[in-house]
Image (spheres, rainbow, N blue to C red):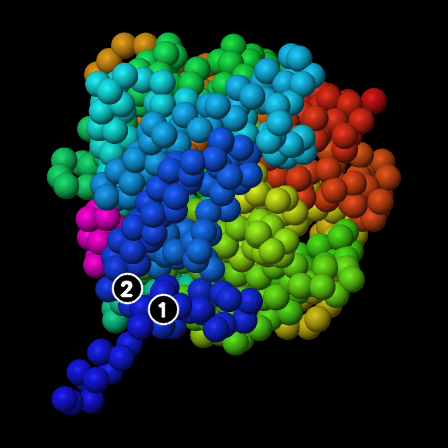
Amino acid sequence: MNENTSELTQRLNPFFQPYNTPHETAPFHLIRLEDYEEAFMEGIRRENEEIDLIVNDPAEPTFDNTIARVDNSKGEHYYDLLGRVSEVFSNLLSAETNDDMDDLAQKLDPILTKHSNDVSLNPKLFERTKHIYEVYEEAKRTGILPEGHRELTAEEHRLLEDEYDGYVRSGALLDEAGKQRLRELTEEGSMLSLQFSQNLLKEKKAFVLHITDEQQLDGLPDTAREAAAQAAKERRKKGWVFTLDYPSYHPFMTYSTQRDLRRQMYMAYNTLCTHKGKTCNIDICKRLVNLRRELAQLLGYDTYADYVLKHRMATNTEHVYQLLYDLIGAYKDKALEERKELEEIWKEEAQDVPELEPWDVSFYSHKLQLKQYNLDAEMLRPYLQLDKVIEGVFGLATRLYGITFKENKDIPVYHPDVKAYEVFDRDGSYLAVFYADFHPRKGKQGGAWMTEFQGQWVDEKDRNIRPHVSVVMNLTKPTAKNPALLTLGEVETFLHEFGHSLHGMFANTHYEALSGTNVWWDFVELPSQFMENYAVEREFLRTFAFHYKTGEPIPDELIDRIIRSRNFMVASGCLRQVSLGLLDMAYYTQRKEFDADIIPFEKEAWKDAIITPQLPDTCMTVQFSHIMAGGYAAGYYSYKWAEVLDADAFSLFKRNGIFDPKTAQSFRDNILSKGGTEHPMTLYKRFRGQEPTIDALLERNGIKQQS
């Protein structure tokens, strides 16, 4: 037997054994593509075996022998194999994929969806859950709890209600024909969502603007030129390459004087996945809307939005539309003023341009910001070195909550861009592992998100299993000449995702299903958007904003300009978010089969929030991952809903001091650590002392005078 054959024979799948890494973190350096399918199949077998043990238990169903075992279903095994392989594979599918992984995902998706349906539609499991649920519902009415059942904590009551309702919402009360149809809908929907994401990634990464004439770089700052030169070098091309990744696209649209090239970039970005061919998403979007509508109606709801909003703070479509139209009423006049100011500076500077087009907006917005505040993103970059920003963001968490971060290079990572940190609590005890993945690359989706490789829960031996949290972003990369220098907007993105990560890291619940960010989706954005407030706070900027060459602190006068400009084009930005919320609701309030032409439908759906002419060929829907593949279907309004909460919450910090430890501890205790253990409004009022109002948001945005 040769050495290679021996190695293959002896090698064990890393998912099948203890990781033997710091804090049992995923051993990315050992995992091979072929390991995933084997681990998924064995994980499904083990989970089915565990469920069989639960449903065939001859004892009367109780919370402990059914509900608790399903949530923390480790059984005889020291870990949840299906969970551990799913977390690694799904996260890398977004952050570090390739064609082979994409093919494997398409192969595995129907198998995994079928297994999920097998669990949620298991009649014996549902009957046991239903029996327990009815026991406690009867006890609420009578005050008498039958022998063999114990009093439950508030968290356990919440878990029981969620488990029962989860089965019902997954079709447990349907007849066999209905259950079969539900299986078909969910399996097809899962495959289409995956295909949507893969199409978008392929089209976005396929586009490059390759420039060889240096004159066509006119207007671009040195940072953009250096990044483009590096991108060209990575592709073994001469000259400069610009892509549709945000750190490349946004500076080009903001600074390039080459209007024809701006148009080319804009149209490439805004027509992604609209062209005929394998990567077109138009028919996929139509089908996803209809699948979700049919699923909701199968379960007894008029629309998919009605189905979703039953488990949201907004509760119904009327409240969502009320929020969106209240915001239109409050912000539209201001947005029209902003548009008029933009058109005025365009007329001043562009006599040879017959009309202000969408690819001109960023360019002239930049000129307007310079005129009004003498400020642009490039002025701030030298003071926003990524390494210092990391120190600042970590230092903010230390100042607020007493936690500290220590990079541990012994923790395996899945790409050299990723940094891994151990997080320690105020008393020095281990709290979490934090991964940060900073820069765009070929196999990585655009945007920014927070996720987990391990959730938090308390196991059967009363050990608090701490989370492994990850933040994935697409921030400006370092170049051969300079370190990574960020824009203020990128700092806000970092703070946003870091807020999500704090929600995960501070998780302190008993059951994983209620842990961390497992909350209603119009509440989950509160911790993230709350953190964005610090980006324009003088005291925070003073902690890390030093010139990357001289070490000089950011000048007070520049901070003053940042603060004065915080509401620059704020109304236009608000209406943009509202327009996306309207588009989302238009799709998911459909009662009949949807067969409209996507592009004109989109323009009609959001017209009340649009103040600029729309181009006939552009389309957001086909790249709107949030509502087609990201879980925000009938929920995109959540960002504005949570913005009301975050402004109201931060107003308390402004009153008590933005670093006030007592207020921060209350935010941690009542919001960040509680997960989904109680109704979100209950948690919020416990922190704030009252329900939120829109006033703080209007005051922050300068729409309403501060009281």
Dot 1 alpha-carbon crowd within 10 angstroms: few under 14, some 14 to 19, many 20 or more:
many
The residues colored magenta run 97-108
Instruction: Assign a secondary structure to mark 2.
Output: helix
In the image, residue 46 sits, relative to residue 4, either above or below, namely above
Task: Name the side, left or right, on which 589 lies relative to 64.
Answer: left
> Which quadrant is the C terminus positioned in?
top right
Residue 118 or residue 630, whichever sits in front: 118
For disc 2, the marked residue is 35
Q: Secondary structure at mark 1?
A: helix
**Is 106 included in the stretch rendered in magenta?**
yes
The amino acid on which the numbered mark 2 sits, given as a three-letter code, is Asp
Nearer the N terminus, badge 2 or badge 1?
1
Q: Residue at x 36, y 18 (%)?
A: 173
Specify the quadrant of the image occupied by residue 185: top left
Residue 485 x/y as whole percent: 55, 62
| Residue 163 drawn at (x, y percent) | 49, 30
Please name the amino acid that badge 1 sits on: Pro
Q: In the rendered image, is residue 693 in sight?
A: yes
In this rendering, position of residue 369 left or right of residue 268? right
Residue under pointer 1: 14
Would you say 114 lies left or right of 89 here? left
- Magenta segment's dominant SS is helix
Tag 2–tag 1 contact (CB < 8 Å): yes
| Residue under the point 31% across and 17% down | 174
Other residues around mark 2 within 10 Å, as few (<14) / some (14–19) / many (≥20):
some
Q: Which of 218/642 is in front?
A: 642
Residue at 22% x, 24% y: name it. Answer: 180
